[in-house]
Amino acid sequence: MSIWLLSAALLGAPEPGAWKPAEAPPPTPWALAGARGWRLCQEAERQARAVRDGEGPRGSALEGDEGLWRRRAEQCPHAVEVLTLAAQSEIIGASELFSRIDVDEDDEFGSPTPRLSIDDAMAQYRARVEQALEWLDAALAESGRRGERPPRQALYFRAYALTALGRVEPAREAIEAVIVAQDVERWRSERMAALVELFAGDVRAALRRAQRGVVDAPPEDRPISRYIRALVLDRAGAPDVARAELVALRDPTTQFARSAMESVLPFHERLFFRALDHQANGERSPALRLWKAYLARPEPAEPERVLARRHLDELTPSPAPVGGP
């Protein structure tokens, strides 16, 4: 840096009439060392990288203080690791809004937090995931400006956000970018791609990719893939197979997997999936409420409505015969 400044000082005077005000020189290392904002962002970047590499306090970073990385992203808009972790944290935090929806006067989810209407929860959810998408786009743009590889999993979480928002074609393109860049393991890309193909109406492609997501996943991650495959199977016209899979998965050790799977679904699709899971496990009352809530939404297409009504009819008892046998 000092050599550059010395060279600039030794340059000759410009030609008469060609003079322009000199641009401010870049800050020296000493100036940077004394810049409080710069030092704070460098430290935030270091901490974010440690958390994302599994070396930092994951629980406190992603769960203990929900707004921590949101604030840091606003303070350090060019710190790519901070932006990526803030987006990841926002997606996880937004996913928890589903547990607060007020489907009925009964507290189906057992949450002590204030209840939300489905409309309010969906609006908050969409706003937060869209904010996460903005941060990821900013991180990718900054990496490109620097000529650096994007932060690890930034492409993946961008596809995650687009899938959760129900933006099918952009999500499909984003997942292909994840596969090309090998941003995550292929089975993770495949099982997310299965959901996107399902929402696009290509059930054959969804089945193929969902199966690959199950077969190739390691044992500890396979329950998430199996939940995705169960949803695809139900939509593909194999409700009995889907039901058997959901019953087999209903175990205290797999409940995290169900929540993780739901976090990538558009909000109205969560109503469908949760209703399906309750019905498969013989929980009639919550299933009824969730099917009715799903059918009251404007988002489902007609084929999905037909399937939901069919499931709902299975829960509705037939009227008693009149006049006896």
Image (spheres, rainbow, N blue to C red):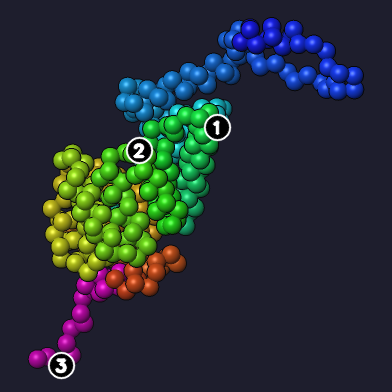
Count the marks: 3
Q: CA distance from mark 3 to mark 1?
A: 79 Å
Which residue does the image show at 30% across and 55% down from the upper left? 194
* Percent of width and height locating residue 98: 37, 50
* Percent of width and height locating residue 12: 80, 11
Please give the residue where the numbered disc 2 appears in the rendered image: 183
Q: Please determine whether, in this image, residue 143 is positioned above or below residue 229.
A: above
* Percent of width and height locating residue 78: 55, 29
| 324 within the magenta span | yes
Q: Quick one: SS at disc 1?
A: helix
| 86 within the magenta span | no
Disc 3 residue type (three-letter): Gly
Report the front residue among 262 and 318: 262
Which badge, 2 or 1, comes first in the chain's sequence? 1
* Image quadrant in which you'd find residue 274: bottom left
* Percent of width and height locating residue 160: 39, 46
Which residue does the image show at 40% across and 45% down from the upper left? 177
Mark whose residue sits in front, 2 or 3: 2
Left or right, 263 with respect to 14, comes to: left
* Image quadrant in which you'd find residue 180: top left
Which badge, 3 or 1, comes first in the chain's sequence? 1
* Mark 2 nearby-residue class (10 Å; few <14, some 14–19, many ≥20): many
* Image quadrant in which you'd find residue 296: bottom left
Start-end of magenta stretch: 308-325
Q: Please determine whether, in this image, residue 222 is positioned above or below residue 120.
A: above
Please give the residue where the numbered disc 3 appears in the rendered image: 323
Left or right, 24 with respect to 155, comes to: right
Which residue does the image show at 38% across and 32% down from the upper left? 152
Marks 2,3: beta carbons within 8 A:
no
Please give the residue where the numbered disc 1 appears in the rendered image: 145
